[in-house]
Image: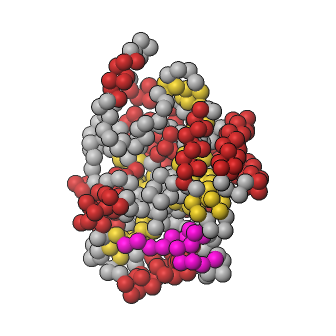
Amino acid sequence: MFEDVDPKDLEEGRKYLMSGSVGGGLPIIVESGKGAVLKDSNGKEYIDCTSQAWTFNIGMSHPRVIEAVTEQINKITHVRTSFETVPKLLALKKIGEIAPADLKKISFCLHGSVANESALKLAITNNPDRVKFLSPFENYSGRTLATIAGSWPYPPICKLFSGFMEHFIRIPNAYCYRCPLGQDYPKCGLLCAEYVKTMIERGCEPVIAIILEPFQSSGGMIGFPDGYLKRLREICDEFGILLIFDEIQTGFGRLGSMFGCELYGVYPDILTYGKAIAGGFPLAGVMQRTSLKPPEPATDSFTFAHFPVSLAAAIATLDVMKEEKLVERAKVMGEYFTSRLKGLQNKYEIIGDIRGPGLMIGIELVKDRKTKEKASGACHSIVTESIEDGVIFGESKFKGLGNVLKIKPPFVISEAQADRVLEVFEKHIKKQQDKL
């Protein structure tokens, strides 16, 4: 269908792209993808260390997913949510079987932001007499009006949403490399968590829920120290506060466990999922404890929420993850990357910190290890220049947080491909080190 496209038509189309669209401006027109490799319209290949916004844990264009969606497309592509389909019921069964703890009631939608907004509505339904949510510094929950209010703020935007912002209170996160309370772990005794308790006791109106990622991604690839999430769980239980884990980016193996909560052994009341569940097709949703009251259908129903094509893709994706042992592979390959990166950290002072279990790796770049002055320009240069060498890295772009480079490839990345990624990274990290 697109073999004979006139390049002029592509340039003409680009003129209509709305300013501010996320990802606009990358010098690549993607033509195809397979495994961990993208190919552009000129035939050049790139090892993708972004999994295209975390969606391709099982790799791009997996034949099992293509087969499943093709079969479903030939049957029917859409039914309204009040109708049932075979993909819907089978997907519920498969997700229910792997859902952690008692999170056995499941809903569907198509986007992570919508899933998080659904989680907020669910929390309000179950704590109707309360008025506030808590979310950490560097949190990211989405781009709808409510979820952006609970995210690390974009200062020019937040003033427009003051009506939503007033329902969220920021709490210090356990960002040990840059502790917001100036402490050192573990001597601190998890002061950041105890501070949350003090806020609840003395400074907050009644709290509905705490919403956070078990591993902060967009806000800088920040993992929490042992005991932090457990202490938050205890505080929530003490004050009747619901705990919401946003696992849209951490779920389905990214941390080397099926879900991040399983890695920490701490289980929320509500869990949101998305991104990688459907092998590149749009699907997200909410898991809730069976003891919680479900939302009223009229408050949480969407036209394409039970999209049978995506549900068919999810069934195939979960089968592939199990059969190919991809969660285990994410753990192994994460250790492979991290051990090599630790070696580079010993060589290059610009590498301040390396974070993340599994294939959720953040590399924080600094101009000086003592002052920890951020090397945001260096990070952006590495990401931009590595594209020419056929490697696509991720980059934390939140205001003030642009010095963290991300390595989050599909789990099927080979050791040879990983070696090439590390080779390109060292080439450009050395270049930036020499500029300091």
Residue 37, compared with residue 153, is above or below; it is: above
Q: Which image quarter is the C terminus in?
A: bottom right
- Asked where in the image residue 326 lies, by quadrant, the reply is top right
In the image, farthest residue toward the top = 4
| 345 sits to left or right of 178 | right
- Where residue 345 appears, as percent x and y from the top left, is 73, 55
Q: Main secondary structure of the magenta part?
A: loop
Residue 359, compared with residue 262, is above or below; it is: above
Q: Identify which residue is drawn at 65% across, 62% down.
A: 368
Q: Nearer the viewer, residue 138 or 94?
A: 138
| 357 sits to left or right of 252 | right
- Where residue 291 appears, as percent x and y from the top left, is 40, 67
Q: Does residue 68 show up?
A: no
Q: Nearer the viewer, residue 305 or 138?
A: 138
Q: Identify which residue is drawn at 55% across, 51% down.
A: 377
Q: Does residue 279 show up?
A: yes
Residue 263, compared with residue 415, is above or below; it is: below
- Where residue 91 appears, as percent x and y from the top left, is 45, 43
- Asked where in the image residue 417 lies, by quadrant, the reply is top right
- The magenta segment is 169-184
- Where residue 425 appears, as percent x and y from the top left, is 67, 43
Q: Which image quarter is the N terminus in?
A: top left
Q: Identify which residue is drawn at 44% across, 29% down.
A: 69
Residue 257, compared with residue 386, is above or below; it is: below
